[in-house]
Amino acid sequence: MHDLLMDEYSKLWDIVLDGPFIQTFEVKDGEITRVIPKTRQQYSEVDRKKIEKFYKAKKLLVCGIGAGEFNRISACELAKEIWDYLKTAHAGTKQVKESEIDMFTSQYENLK
């Protein structure tokens, strides 16, 4: 049972990090192959299960935040967008981190 839950959480985390699975099909026109998104009527049962996981991943992220942050992420449609926002809001961007490292290094050197 524990392994099944870990597998489920791992798949949900992949959706958060990689973005959603987009249901598509290929159309060949001579040598050119185009990838076209499926309509809802064209979804298979497998497609529907993947979409369900996408919504579950998004729901888990949304349920884990407070009302103030919910207002800030409510326009996000993808779990990945929510995660990227939360990651930036709580850890800062790469530039912010580099700036903080420079600041702390400077403070350390001044203490010496």
Image (spheres, helix red, strand yellow):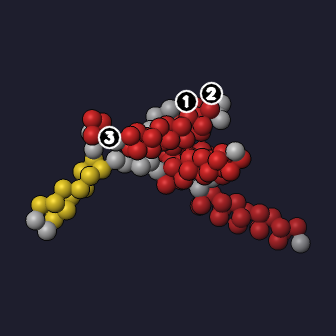
Q: Position of residue 97 (x, y in %)?
A: 66, 60
Residue placed farthest to the top in the image? 67
| Callouts 2 and 1 close, C-beta under 8 Å | yes
Given the image, on which type of amino acid does mark 1 rest?
A: Asn
- Asked whether residue 58 is in view, the answer is no
Instruction: Report crowding for label 3: few under 14, some 14 to 19, many 20 or more residues within 10 A (C-alpha).
Output: some
Q: CA distance from mark 2 to mark 3?
A: 34 Å
Q: Which comes before the other along the chain, label 2 or label 3? A: 3
| Front-lying residue, 25 or 85 | 25
In this figure, which residue is indicated by the disc labeled 2? 67
Element carrying mark 1: helix
Element carrying mark 3: loop
| Front-lying residue, 86 or 9 | 9
Which residue is rendered at x = 16% and y = 65% of the image? 32
In this figure, which residue is indicated by the disc labeled 3? 43
Q: Position of residue 55 (x, y in %)?
A: 49, 37
Q: CA distance from mark 1 to mark 3?
A: 32 Å
Which residue is rendered at x = 12% and y = 61% of the image? 29
Q: Position of residue 83 (x, y in %)?
A: 56, 46
In this figure, which residue is indicated by the disc labeled 1? 71
Residue placed farthest to the left in the image? 30
Q: CA distance from mark 2 to mark 1?
A: 6 Å
**19 to the left or right of 13:** left
The answer to whether residue 14 is above or below residue 48 is below
